Amino acid sequence: ALVSVSKLLFQADRGGYAVGAFNANNMEIVQAIIRAAELERSPVIMQASQGAINYAGLEFISGMVKIAAESSSVPVALHLDHGTDFEQVVKCIRSGFSSVMYDGSKLPLEENIAMTKKVLDIARPIEVSVEAELGKIGGTEDDIHVSEKEALYTDPEEARYFVEQTGVESLAIAIGTAHGQYKGEPRLDFERLAQIKSLVKIPIVLHGSSGVPDESLRKAIKLGVCKVNIDTNIREALVWTMRKVMAENPAEIDPRKILGPARDAAVEIIREKIRVFGSSGQA
Ligand code: G3H
Ligand code: 13P
Ligand code: ZN
Ligand code: NA
């Protein structure tokens, strides 16, 4: 059965490692994630974004992940990534998700608190985990300067207040990462992370982690990051391999011959990330 994310993150927090949360968009990705986790003997989180739900449909995503989890020898959680709609959160929980993110980061602070509490009120009694977001994690395509960016970073005192008011189980923070591919090398505000972690005792979540150097990821994990979100690295592994196979075999018309090697490449990148996160052998 699917395990709760809180339980995985509690163990990660104590053990000084992080659990990878990989975005699941289709069958090949679900299979790649589960295969990588099993080869590494690691717990794993599969997460469905808005794009994934629009593309594959909620029931297909939850169905595929449940099938993967049933036959798996490692703990698997299914998490809603960046939920912004209360009704959708309810739908995901009904469909069997073991965890949800309520992303109220675009709302004024008090509204973010109120909505996060509303989600906690329905999730907590049935042991579904809840992740919240404070501060604005942008996309790399949002062309803003570093100084402007810092204004969007999570404020440590505000984080303390937010966690106190909501009692949320994990918190996504903005410390310099962004969704998608980076143009240069991302620089993380580790001091801010350390300050936040000293004020809130719950597991911290790092979004936009594809493209963040391994050393920075290790340092962030040492400072209290327990869940690391990876999407773009999987997209790259899949598409780069598909392009290569199609270029080498322009007459190939069997999608399995193109998607199969792409899936293998996804397994490799996910295994590499799991090793960096330190969760190998923790299942
Ligand atoms: O959190 C954002 C994901 O990395 C991508 O989201 O699948 O909705 O494009 P999407
Ligand atoms: P990346 O696509 O940069 O890995 O970000 C993933 C993410 O944060 C999903 O919530
Ligand atoms: Zn994200
Ligand atoms: Na990124």
Image (cartoon, rainbow, N blue to C red):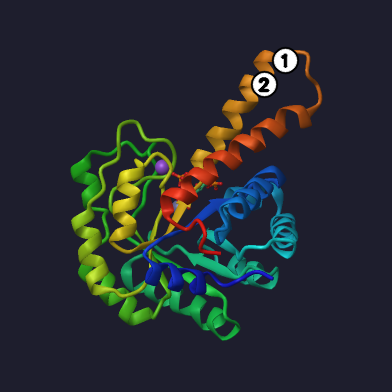
> On screen, 45 above or below 39?
below
Residue 204 position, x and y percent, is: 36, 64
The structure residue drawn at horizontal position 59% and vertical position 39%, both measured from the top left corner, is 266
* Number of other residues with Cα within 10 Å of mark 1, as a class: few under 14, some 14 to 19, many 20 or more: few
The structure residue drawn at horizontal position 33% and vertical position 74%, both measured from the top left corner, is 110
Q: Which mark is residue 113?
A: none
Q: Quadrant of residue 92?
A: bottom right
Q: Quadrant of the C terminus?
A: bottom right
Residue 268 position, x and y percent, is: 56, 39
Amino acid type at mark 1:
Asn
Distance (Cα) linking label 2 and label 1:
6 Å
Q: Secondary structure at mark 1?
A: loop
Left or right placement of residue 186 versus residue 179 in this view: left
Toward the front, the furthest residue is 281
**141 or 272: which is nearer to us?**
272
Left or right placement of residue 4 versus residue 193 in this view: right
Ligand 2 under 8 Å from disc 2 Cβ: no
**39 or 112: which is nearer to us?**
39
Q: Quadrant of the N terminus?
A: bottom right
Amino acid type at mark 2:
Val
User: Can residue 87 be spotted in the picture?
Assistant: yes
User: Can residue 174 be spotted in the picture?
Assistant: no
The structure residue drawn at horizontal position 32% and vertical position 69%, both measured from the top left corner, is 109
Residue 77 position, x and y percent, is: 59, 65
Query: Do callouts 2 and 1 mark residues in contact (Cβ within 8 Å)?
Result: yes
Left or right placement of residue 253 versus residue 175 in this view: right
Residue 149 position, x and y percent, is: 25, 46
The structure residue drawn at horizontal position 30% and vertical position 31%, both measured from the top left corner, is 184
Q: Secondary structure at mark 2?
A: helix
Ligand 1 under 8 Å from disc 1 Cβ: no
Read off the residue under disc 2: 245
Read off the residue under disc 1: 249
